[in-house]
Amino acid sequence: MRGWLAAVVGAGALGFFVARLTASPAPSPAVVRTQSPLDGDALRADLRRAVREELRSSRAELLAEIRSARETGAATPAPAEAPAAVPEVTTDEPASTSARALIARAASARRWGEDEAHELRRLIPRLTLQQRDEVLATLIPAINRSDIALDAVPPF
Amino acid sequence: MKTTMRNVKAGLAALTVAMTAMGGTAWAGWKYSQDVVVDTLGMSAYGQMGRARNSTDSVQYLYCMTQAYAGSSTPQLLCGARSLSAVQWCSTREPALVAAATGINGDSWVSFTWNTSGQCTSLTVTNGSQHEAKE
């Protein structure tokens, strides 16, 4: 996309200056020159104006293409840097951190009660599959080894 | 002839008495009750949902849950069992085990096994008239 835009802008700018050198000396209504035709400041201003016009024009063309593609049901071109895959579940780093901290606290206290179960139930849906597996692979063996003692209620 | 009829009547009466005496057991069907057992060395647990529920100890339980998430094709199964002396849990995303868990109801006999990683390695579900029903 960037290369295409650069090409359009470059071609436009070049065309603009060729036209300026070969065209009649009559000034454009939008360009009021008070100095000689080879004045540097005027040239820079002209260049800026030309680039802006080309960019505006290119953007309008691009938007029109996208609009047309949507209307005809064609797929919009994917951005070059689109992510390769959408995660299965929205990753929430703080949730996984909280889950690990919850288990670490339980391991330290050697106890897992209703509060911890409630907290885990809240966190688990916000974890990715991998994070969920990691949490369960830590907690369950600890329960089974009696490193973490369960209260009367089920832990999940 | 009279004697014969009397004998038949007596026989029928005896049969009726005998059937009444036996009937309480024979006609009610086979019954089987099983408290929750957790074998930590054998890494297996089993028991009856109804029996665990009806027990008077308020300790034992059998528990299996499946969790499904939007966007995820693999539900999670968690099973746990608590006896009077031990508690063990396992989890898995193995589709066959998750599918087996859907057969559990309130009167099922359930058995599961696990490995040292806490992964469930089998799940057996039995539904039969012999199992104690929840009261």
Image (tube, rainbow, N blue to C red):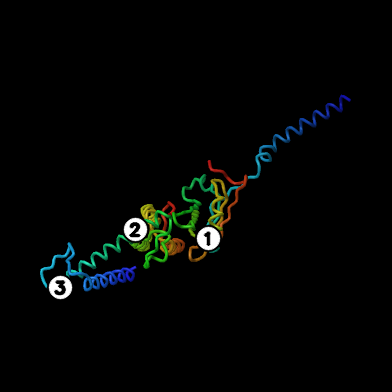
Judging depth in this view, the residue of B15 and A152 nearest the camera is A152
Q: CA distance from mark 1 to mark 3?
A: 79 Å
Which-is-in-front pick, marks 1 and 2? 2
User: Which residue corresponds to mark 2?
Assistant: A64
Q: Residue at x 86, y 26 (%)?
A: B3
Pointer 3: residues within 10 angstroms few (<14), some, or many (20+)?
A: few
Q: Evaluate whether residue B86 shows in this view.
A: no
Along the line of sight, which residue is nearer the eye, B119 or A58? A58
Kindly report which numbered mark, 1 or 3, lies closer to the viewer in this rendering. Answer: 3
**How many residues crowd mark 2 within 10 Å: few (<14), some (14–19), many (20+)?**
few
Mark 2 or mark 3: which is in front? Answer: 3
Residue A133 position in % (x across, y down): 44, 63
Q: Amino acid at mark 1?
A: Glu
* A43 horizontally vs A136: left or right: left
Instruction: Kindly identify which chain the residue marked by label 3 belongs to.
Output: A
Which residue occupies the extreme right position in the image? B1
Find disc 1 in the rendering and name its residue: B94
* Residue labelled with disc 3: A37
Residue A12: % across, % down: 28, 69
**Left/right of residue A144 with respect to residue A38 in the rendered view:** right
- The dot on residue A139 is none
Tell me residue A51's x, y (percent).
Answer: 24, 68
- SS assignment at label 2: helix
- Per the model, the C-alpha gap separating discs 1 and 2 is 50 Å
| Residues at marks 1 and 3 touching, judged by CB atoms closer than 8 Å | no
**B76 or A34: which is nearer to us?**
A34
Q: Residue at x 19, y 69 (%)?
A: A46
Q: Do callouts 1 and 2 mark residues in contact (Cβ within 8 Å)? A: no
Q: CA distance from mark 2 to mark 3?
A: 36 Å
Q: Amino acid at mark 3?
A: Pro
